[in-house]
Image (spheres, rainbow, N blue to C red):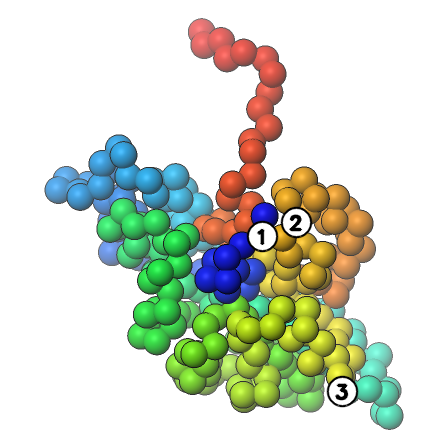
Amino acid sequence: MRLSPLSSAVLSGVTVGSLMLMAPAVSSSVATATGTTAGSTATDDCPVREYAMGLRYQQSAHAAAAQQQGWTLAEARLRKEVADHRRGEEDLAIVTDLDETVLDNSPLLARDLEACHTYTSWDTWSDWELEGEPTLTPGAARFFRYADRHGVAIYYVSDRFAENKVATMATLRELGLPQVSPEQVLLYGTSKEERRAVAEEDHEVVLLLGDSLPDFHDDFDGASAQEQEVLVAEHAGHFGRDWIMFPNATYGTWRKAPLEAWEQPLIQP
């Protein structure tokens, strides 16, 4: 499905993360949105109730463990590339998505869910980019410190809004991320493939990191769920090697994919 520019601006780059378990305030927010808290403004007709389970996962220790695992694997792969790199060869670089890969934006989603607002309309995202306080996914800080310390160029390729670039760069610096410059923070405008090519002009890109399939190859952008399944099989050799995928159960092009059910009718005892 071809997305509108606004939806694409977030869906293809806002891939995943949670630094902490669900705080009590956020827990009550999700409970409110699912109609389980007294005085809730949400009802059984709340259209965003279906997102609660994915958001609970995203703010869980399970997601945190998967994110930590992803960054540990990424660092191990990068260590090998650094060790194998020889003087005179092209300098190394990595390309990473931001949202739900490096940054955890789940408090925004929980807030919208509490108000029974469909956060996948992305109309509240710009305000979050300007005023919000995302956190780093677990393991991200150590990985980027390692990359920077070993002279690996870091390109942050995200579909955050270009008009909010100053605010996004300020957020990245506040979180202690290195190499935050206008030349290396590439936001929505051209395709992600074109922005990844910027990193390839003077570097050997040895790692791509993201939470959404278009973070890795242009073939995934606009592909149907069935087409993406075929493409994942075709590119299987990249995952866990030079492509590191992070979990994001809260949004993505997959959310409208049809479910495959067992044909046997349900019979309850």
Residue at the spot 54% in from the left edge and 11% down from the top edge: 265
Q: Is residue 258 left or right of residue 151?
A: left
Q: Residue at x 84, y 79 (%)?
A: 84
Give amino acid for label 1.
Answer: Arg
- Quarter-wise, where is residue 52 in the image? top left
Q: Which residue is label 2 attached to? A: 223
Quadrant of the frame with the C terminus = top left
Query: Could one spot residue 137 in this view of the protein?
Result: no
Image height of 168 relative to 10, above or below:
below
Nearest to N terminus: mark 1 or mark 3 = 1
Q: Which residue is mark 1?
A: 2
Residue projecting furthest to the bottom: 88
Callout 3, which amino acid?
Asp
| Residue 202, disc | 3
* Left or right relative to 254: residue 195: right
Q: Which tag is nearer the camera, tag 1 or tag 2? A: 1
Q: In this orientation, which residue lies closer to the viewer: 255 or 123?
A: 123
| Sequence-wise first label, 1 or 2 | 1
Q: Residues within 10 Å of mark 3 (few under 14, many from 20)?
A: few
At x 64%, y 44%, the residue is 224
